[in-house]
């Protein structure tokens, strides 16, 4: 937080707070902006409000300089994020998304790191129609972005299918409970009747100015921590006894975002604050949200996430405040154990007697390209498949609930369209990357478009050291915001400038320890030079079953970072 001359904390609210306050519950001048045919953009204030409706204004950065030279406005288009609570959708819904991808977007569908779907490249004149079509398929985009609770994540575990459906139902209800109640979305995008008196409209949980910043919830079903529960503002860890759901451990204060060179910003893993019964998760989430609503920093957006509220005031204060608002006390957390974060690719047989096929999608981008006709393949599967399509936190897809009789048909389509790749390395199957160029306005380096070629080279090094079958969690982002949760990766690459990355090492395999900065601002040659001797050392000196992330700490390449990491090189 900045301080003024008299040393009192700066209390001036951020401009986004003004925009929210003046917006009449997120209406702003969005309707007028959509009608303005002079420009492909929307009004500046509306670019903040559109996020609450799941819409980001972007421009194609590949051609930004050229357009400027030609004195043209940037090539504006919009990214639309569709909420998919728990990542579960029907085949019909998949087909509806596919149709929009090919009619209004850039012929791709993007599975996000939070189990949602993104369209890129939608131009202003098609925005309203696209949102209306999304709603026709019983999906929506409200609260997919903005200072509210985002898509609620949930382990889409196909093996423990009965438990999954119980926990999934809870995550869907939680998502609904925390959805903003404003009528603005329906008025602007769906032409529903306008409320004449917006003053009497209530946002019972958020209040008129919503939250100070984005808020994220994930629910993990051990032994898998695919949702990276400790990176969430609020996480729930399902606790089972003899296959029955007993309740959830509650964790709070996770978050990845930081800024280069600003040590007051940092990634943090969530702290365990207690346990609650299954029927109490909405109540617990609501109280945590209201504590953050009332105490989060509205004067500095870089210091506005729950992790800073907790660190500024103390975990004990926070837990007490939540308990006070609940009117009862969270119980003591119960033991749990995680053993993985990646998806189990290929076929699994569920406790529901149905088959599930998990398909690897490189960095979540479904496109018809040289590596296969992924978009067409999934369309054909969805046309024949009656069950669900589930999106994973590792940007993959599960064709879920396939009766034995349909298994071969799905397998044939998947094979014919390059959706099943038997050659996939362990490194690649455990990797994720954020979008970055050309659409992300904050990207400093490539990510999604670059990571596959870098991984191929790293795989070469692993292979040369006999490590090709060792699973290692690696993640890349094009900037320090952390959209692919890179600070929770055993090997993390964070973009610093075109072609240059910070290299982080030493997070735990299961996601309960952050990594540490090992080398700063290095290019591809330096990345490979840095990793090669470490792999050789690991190959010769690892103890049985010792994970790469643990080894680099024991061998002294970096020191361990428990739950809060700074951008200070910690090489020992
Ligand atoms: Fe993110 C901003 C993409 C998950 C932390 N994120 C952005 C924007 C919208 C850029 C912008 O503000 O203009 C990116 C749009 C790129 C594009 O062209 O599509 C973007 N974030 C993504 C996605 C699509 C990455 C992906 O490859 O899948 C993910 C969408 C998730 C979803 O469905 O809701 C995505 N973003 C995350 C995650 C991971 C997570 O939530 O599990 C994080 C780290 C966790 C966290 O929030 O701390 C994350 N995104 C950020 C931040 C930093 C927030 C902070 O506290 O500092 C920003 C920048 C901001 O908010 O100012 C950001
Ligand atoms: Fe964009 Fe940075 Fe997020 Fe990547 S990590 S999508 S570059 S904001």
Image: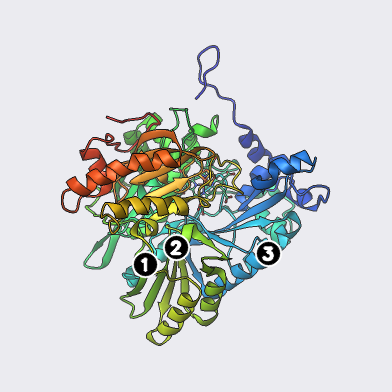
Reading the image, the residue beneath label 1 is 345
Direction from residue 43 to residue 151 in the image, left or right: left
Direction from residue 166 to residue 1 in the image, left or right: right
- Of all residues shown, which one is farthest toward the top? 6
Direction from residue 462 to residue 367 in the image, left or right: right
Q: Secondary structure at mark 2?
A: loop
Reading the image, the residue beneath label 2 is 396
The quarter of the picture where residue 556 lies is top left
Give the residue at x 29% y 53%.
464
Q: Nearer the viewer, mark 2 or mark 3?
A: 2
The quarter of the picture where residue 354 lies is bottom left
The quarter of the picture where residue 64 lies is top right
Q: CA distance from mark 2 to mark 3?
A: 26 Å
Q: Position of residue 203 (x, y in %)?
A: 58, 48
The answer to which of marks 1 and 2 sits earlier in the sequence is 1
Could you tell me which quadrant the C terminus lies in?
top left
Reading the image, the residue beneath label 3 is 132
Q: Position of residue 442 (x, y in %)?
A: 57, 41
Q: CA distance from mark 3 to mark 1?
A: 34 Å
Depth check, front residue: 565 or 458: 458
């Amino acid at each position: 937080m900045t301080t003024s001359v008299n040393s009192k904390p700066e209390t001036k609210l951020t401009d986004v707070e003004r925009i929210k306050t003046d917006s009449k519950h997120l209406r702003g001048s969005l309707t007028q902006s959509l009608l303005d045919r002079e420009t492909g953009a929307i009004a500046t204030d509306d670019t903040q409000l559109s996020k609450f409706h799941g819409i980001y204004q972007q421009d194609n950065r590949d051609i930004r300089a050229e357009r400027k030279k030609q004195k043209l406005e940037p090539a504006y288009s919009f990214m639309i994020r569709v909420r998919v609570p728990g990542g579960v959708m029907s085949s019909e819904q998949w087909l509806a998304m596919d149709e929009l991808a090919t009619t209004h977007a850039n012929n791709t569908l993007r599975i996000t790191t939070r189990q949602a779907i993104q369209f890129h490249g939608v131009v202003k004149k098609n925005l309203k129609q696209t949102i209306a079509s999304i709603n026709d398929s019983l999906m929506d985009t409200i609260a997919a972005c903005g200072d509210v609770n985002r898509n609620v994540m949930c382990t889409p575990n196909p093996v423990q299918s009965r438990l999954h459906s119980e926990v999934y139902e809870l995550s869907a209800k939680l998502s609904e409970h925390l959805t903003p109640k404003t009528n603005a979305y329906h008025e602007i995008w769906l032409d529903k009747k306008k409320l004449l008196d917006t003053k009497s409209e209530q946002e019972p949980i958020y209040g008129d100015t919503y939250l100070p910043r984005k808020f994220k919830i994930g629910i993990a079903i051990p032994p898998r921590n695919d949702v990276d529960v400790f990176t969430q503002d609020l996480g729930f860890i399902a606790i089972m006894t003899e296959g029955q759901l007993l309740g959830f451990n509650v964790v709070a204060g996770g978050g990845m975002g930081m800024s280069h060179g600003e040590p007051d910003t940092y990634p943090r893993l969530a702290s365990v604050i207690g346990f609650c019964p299954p029927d109490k998760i909405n109540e617990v989430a609501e109280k945590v949200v209201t504590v953050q609503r009332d105490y989060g920093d509205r004067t500095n957006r870089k210091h506005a996430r729950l992790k800073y509220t907790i660190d500024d005031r103390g975990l004990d204060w926070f837990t007490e405040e939540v308990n006070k608002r609940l009117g009862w006390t969270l119980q003591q957390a119960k033991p749990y154990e995680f053993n993985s974060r990646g998806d189990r690719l290929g076929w699994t047989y569920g406790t529901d007697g149905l088959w599930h096929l998990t398909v690897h999608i490189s960095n979540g981008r479904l496109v018809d390209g040289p590596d296969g006709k992924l978009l067409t393949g999934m369309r054909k599967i969805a046309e024949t498949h009656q069950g669900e399509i589930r999106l994973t936190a590792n940007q993959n897809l599960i064709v879920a609930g396939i009766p034995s009789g349909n298994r071969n048909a799905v397998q044939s389509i998947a094979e014919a369209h390059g959706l099943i790749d038997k050659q996939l390395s362990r490194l690649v199957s455990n990797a994720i990357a954020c979008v970055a160029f050309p659409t992300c306005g904050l990207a400093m380096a490539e990510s999604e478009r670059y990571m596959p070629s870098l991984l191929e080279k790293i795989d070469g090094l692993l292979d040369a050291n006999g490590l090709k079958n060792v699973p290692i969690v690696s993640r890349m982002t094009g900037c320090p915001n952390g959209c692919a949760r890179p600070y929770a990766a055993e090997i993390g690459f964070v973009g610093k400038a075109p072609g240059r990355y910070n290299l982080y090492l030493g997070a735990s395999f299961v996601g309960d320890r952050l990594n540490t900065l090992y080398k700063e601002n290095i290019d591809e040659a330096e990345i490979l030079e840095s990793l090669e001797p470490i792999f050789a050392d690991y190959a010769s000196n690892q103890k049985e079953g010792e994970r790469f992330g643990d080894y680099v700490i024991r061998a002294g390449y970096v020191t361990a970072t428990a739950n809060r990491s700074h951008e200070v090189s910690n090489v020992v």
